[in-house]
Image: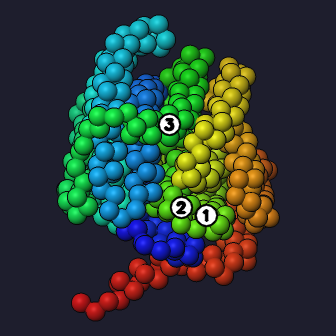
Amino acid sequence: MVGSGPVPSETKAERMAAGGLYSFASKLAVRVASIVNSIVIVRTLGLYDLGVLSIILLLVVVGSTVASLGLPQAVVKFLSDLPEGGNEEASRLIGAAIILTLVATTVTVVTLIAASPLLAAAVYGEPLVAVLLPVAALGLIASAGLSPIIATIQAYEHIRELGRKDIAASILSMPTTVGLVLSLGLLGAVVASVVNALIAILVRVTLLRSIWKGRGLRIVVPQRREPYRKLMNYAFPAMAAGLLVVPAQWLANTLLAANASFAELGRYTVGMSLATYLFFIPDSIGLPFLPLVSRLNRERPADLAVFLLRTLRITTFLLLPPTMTIILFPEPILGLLFGTKGALSAPVARMLAAAIFFAGNAGIVGLAIAGIGRTWDGLAINMIWATVFLSLSFLLVPTMKEVGLAIAFLSAYVIHYCVTIAYASMRWSIRIKGVAQSSLISAGFLGASLLANEIVPGSSVFGILILAAVLIVEGRSMSQREKEVLSLPIRRLFGWLNRPP
């Protein structure tokens, strides 16, 4: 709920920490379900089929970026900005977003289906692409077409309820994926992606009904251009920024498949699957972060710099230990999850885990940029990332294959992180010293871990010592306020567990 008066930045931090507890639990459940699903997929499919599946899903993500037009983020931004009683304006914005998204989704799905035979024959030389891509594209009708409506849950900060729904959807996705993949193989994996998207939408519908009824929302199709123009002025650069990232990854993956084979792409995909599990930490923080930044920017803009600095440092301190764990022990983790063929992706997983660390931290600045409406700035920053990533991919992939692609990915995100921190320092005048301390600690430990693997490969004792050092240094580096914010979700959890029945 939006208060009527100014809210101190400390209260905002505590609200984000409390909301982060619920989103953390839901994201963790989603990641556990994702691990189970990916284990089944990797162990059932060969590396070649896994590479084909990766290309199909990347094409669908590209399509989803176009189909949604960046409108879900715009809905969150503008609904968060509205004062109490702005239900009519909210209804008009939602109606305009739905019309725009449905038109874009229809065009995108038709285009993907029509282009699938050409992509199969001329680009990949794999007939399965022509069969699987139309099936996968059908999932966009629900997931992208209804995304502006789903965005109202985040806009009104129903984080706890959303967490419960996401946990339910993740639990339901596991038997669906297992059954379809074991019975239909590669086709089953594609069908499962569509079915699971539908499940996630259906599970959230009951929550949407209560939110809309409580706030008096309805779908109003505006007759004037202003709501459409307002949404697109914000959403277009956000969509363009996404179109720089996702198609760049698709193009780089296609380059790997063309210069090597789908098997090498499969190994890269296994490493990426493990590394992206780390995203549940910045995702958990980001879910309540965007609407809070939007409101804080309106109510107390002077406090935004402190709030962003604390969020960046907390994200760094939370993300570093699991990142280090993957870098130090990828072989046993991959072998346990994906079997012998999974362990072959260890060199890739190390570098991709480090890349996700920098990507997750930079993403917090990206959400802050979106929260204050500076989406054109986000587009410019993403252009730098895409340029570096694609340039290095074309340089390294032909000779180093999946390892070269991982190096390009890591290098691009290190530069991207440096650019975003420099931007944050200039835009909000945040104390660069506070970010530099946590950044240098993280970079030092990440570099030492990657180097240690070359000097003392596979040393469990050395890895445990480095992890212990990370925790000790982090504990000494955090301020008392940061420790309080981090411990708040834990204290609330124990308080809930100790309540009398």
Picture coordinates of residue 195 (x, y %)?
25, 38
Residue at image coords 69%, 71%:
474
Quadrant where the C terminus is found in the figure: bottom left
Q: Percent x, y for residue 99?
A: 30, 33
Please say if the residues under marks 1 and 2 sit with CB atoms less than 8 Å apart.
yes
x and y percentages locating residue 105 in the rendered image: 33, 28
Amino acid type of the residue tagged 3 in the rendering: Asn
Quarter assignment of residue 121: top left
Q: Residue 271, percent across and down?
A: 55, 41
Residue carrying label 1: 301
Instruction: Tell me: 181 left or right of 74.
Output: left
Dot 2: element: helix
Q: Work out whether residue 412 or residue 86 is closer to the camera in this orientation and state it.
A: 86
The residue sitting at 34% across, 21% down in the picture is 107
- What amino acid is found at the position of numbered circle 1 in the picture? Pro
Q: How many labels were placed on the picture?
A: 3
Task: Please tell me whether mark 1 sits on a helix, a strand or a loop.
Answer: helix
Residue on which the image places disc 2: 298
Left or right of residue 229: residue 216: left
Which residue position is annotated with label 3? Answer: 233
Q: Is residue 462 visible?
A: no
